[in-house]
Image (cartoon, rainbow, N blue to C red):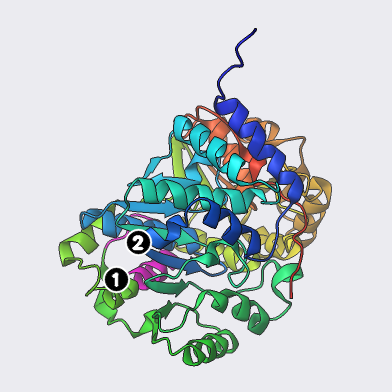
């Protein structure tokens, strides 16, 4: 009788691809059930839970770097990944190994008896189990979509962090800043401190109200003394100083539970690394800036960074976006900065039409030549002699660019695992 082959990494990835068929689900029931079958690993861990519209990943990366510099063993859970699924689950910035992915998929597949967990729910419990097994001192825990009904919200953290509130994912989170803020503020737990960098008055009112109802002390990052904003941060962009202030405020609030010395703060911020967000790559004499600006607020941040940190020259843009984003608004924000624009489809079922993107760029800035091209490879080839190229519009496109540019070389490419169908809304 032929012996059945042991499961391997491609098998595990194929199983994860199969979970995409369940789409995305708003609600905690399935995650709680799967976590219970896995032994409730979240009860053995300490968390900092981070929600918000933009800046979540950067803030998480800063917090991870600071606490690791302080000597803690730190788990990091983020999404989406840029190239490899393994990016989502890291300990001390080391990606989970392929062997551990294989093992955890096999174990949780058996626990997922009703086969009802979505990919994100399954990955959330995978991360919890792995971090508990790794005996992490602290887990930096990023929400996926929203907060209140996001799978990550089964934990009770040491602190709830809300970066900012802007219009994004309106079809699921609401059409106003107040509605979106209410979803993000859903991560606030009774008595757990809240730290936020949210500036929009209507959003701040919601966060303040939810914090008050939960008897959760609220600390705005803007309360930090001005000197706190002067610490050197390795990430480009003035907006990263706001993210750094939020990270510092969080560290300050948790100082008694998680002591951090001043030198740990400086070392952590100086060493933080977060790919795909104003990431500059130099190849020969060419500069390529990668930034996943996927909503209007992100585009404004990118424009400010280009005007301040890359003044004096007009870049060539390579732009691709998802159809369910405000791509016309993003195009209009960025168009005046462009010398030339190549629009491309994103490797996603939800891609915006490259021809329609080019039309909006032409209308917004007729002086810049705007052309739709077949794919990212064609755009990179067409711009190979340009001194400065900006690739932006979607993190999906950034992942594809990193894979093609080999920064860093990837063993596997699982960008397709970022795909999901329309979430089901729960009351």
Seen at 20% across and 68% down, the residue is 259
Q: Which mark is residue 63?
A: 2
Few, some or many C-alpha atoms within 10 Å of disc 2 (few <14, some 14-19, many ≥20)? many
Residue closer to the observer: 48 or 61 = 48
Check if residue 55 falls in the magenta segment: no
Say whether residue 84 is visible: no
Q: Tell which circle, 1 or 2, labels the residue nearer the N-terminal end.
A: 2
Task: Give percent across and percent down for residue 100.
Answer: 45, 35
Q: Secondary structure at mark 1?
A: helix
Which image quadrant is residue 84 in? Answer: top right
- Vertical arrangement, residue 165 with respect to residue 72, above or below: below
Which image quadrant is residue 412 in? Answer: top right
Residue closer to the observer: 388 or 90 = 90
Q: Which mark is residue 251?
A: 1
Q: Give the side of residue 253 with respect to residue 15, left or right.
A: left
Few, some or many C-alpha atoms within 10 Å of disc 1 (few <14, some 14-19, many ≥20)? many
Disc 1 to disc 2, how far (Cα)? Answer: 8 Å
Seen at 48% across and 56% down, the residue is 312
Residue extent of the magenta highlight = 232-247
How many labels were placed on the picture?
A: 2
Task: Give percent across and percent down for residue 398.
Answer: 58, 44
Task: Give percent across and percent down for residue 144.
Answer: 58, 60
Residue furthest toward the front? 1
Task: Give percent across and percent down for residue 102.
Answer: 52, 32
Residue closer to the observer: 115 or 413 = 115
Q: Do the residues bearing badges 1 and 2 touch, measured as CB atoms within 8 Å?
A: yes
């Amino acid at each position: 009788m032929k012996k059945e082959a042991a499961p391997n990494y491609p098998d595990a990835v194929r199983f994860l691809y199969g979970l995409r068929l369940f789409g995305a689900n708003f609600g905690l029931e399935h995650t709680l059930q799967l976590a219970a079958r896995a032994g409730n690993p979240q009860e053995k861990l300490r968390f900092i839970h981070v929600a918000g519209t933009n800046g979540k990943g950067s803030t998480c990366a800063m917090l991870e770097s600071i606490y690791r510099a302080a000597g803690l063993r730190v788990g990091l859970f983020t999404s989406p990944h840029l190239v490899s699924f393994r990016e989502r689950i890291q300990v001390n910035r080391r990606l989970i190994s392929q062997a551990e992915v294989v093992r955890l998929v096999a174990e949780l597949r058996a626990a997922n008896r009703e086969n009802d967990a979505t990919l994100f729910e399954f990955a959330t419990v995978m991360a919890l189990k792995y971090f508990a097994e790794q005996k992490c001192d602290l887990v930096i825990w990023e929400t996926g979509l929203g907060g209140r009904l996001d799978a990550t919200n089964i934990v009770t953290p040491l602190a709830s962090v809300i970066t900012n509130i802007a219009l994004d994912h309106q079809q699921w989170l609401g059409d106003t800043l107040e509605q979106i803020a209410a979803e993000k503020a859903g991560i606030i737990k009774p008595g757990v401190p809240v730290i936020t960098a949210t500036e929009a008055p209507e959003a701040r009112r919601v966060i303040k109200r939810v914090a008050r109802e939960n008897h959760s002390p609220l600390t705005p990052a803007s309360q930090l003394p001005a000197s706190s904003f002067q610490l050197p941060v390795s990430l480009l962009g003035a907006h990263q100083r706001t993210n750094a202030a939020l990270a510092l405020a969080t560290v300050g609030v948790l100082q008694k539970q998680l002591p951090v010395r001043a030198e740990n703060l400086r070392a952590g911020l100086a060493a933080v690394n977060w790919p795909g967000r104003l990431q500059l790559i130099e190849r020969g004499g060419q500069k390529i800036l990668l930034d996943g600006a996927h909503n209007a607020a992100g585009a404004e941040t990118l424009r400010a960074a280009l005007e301040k940190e890359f003044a004096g020259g007009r870049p060539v843009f390579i732009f691709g976006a998802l159809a369910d984003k405000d791509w016309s608004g993003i195009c209009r924000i960025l168009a005046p900065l462009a010398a030339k624009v190549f629009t491309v489809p994103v490797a996603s079922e939800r891609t915006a039409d490259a021809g329609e993107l080019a039309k909006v760029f032409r209308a917004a800035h007729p002086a810049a030549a705007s052309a739709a091209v077949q794919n990212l490879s064609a755009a990179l080839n067409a711009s190979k002699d340009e001194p400065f190229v900006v690739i932006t519009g979607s993190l999906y496109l950034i992942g594809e660019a990193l894979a093609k540019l080999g920064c860093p070389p990837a063993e596997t490419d699982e960008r397709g695992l970022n795909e999901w169908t329309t979430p089901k809304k729960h009351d």
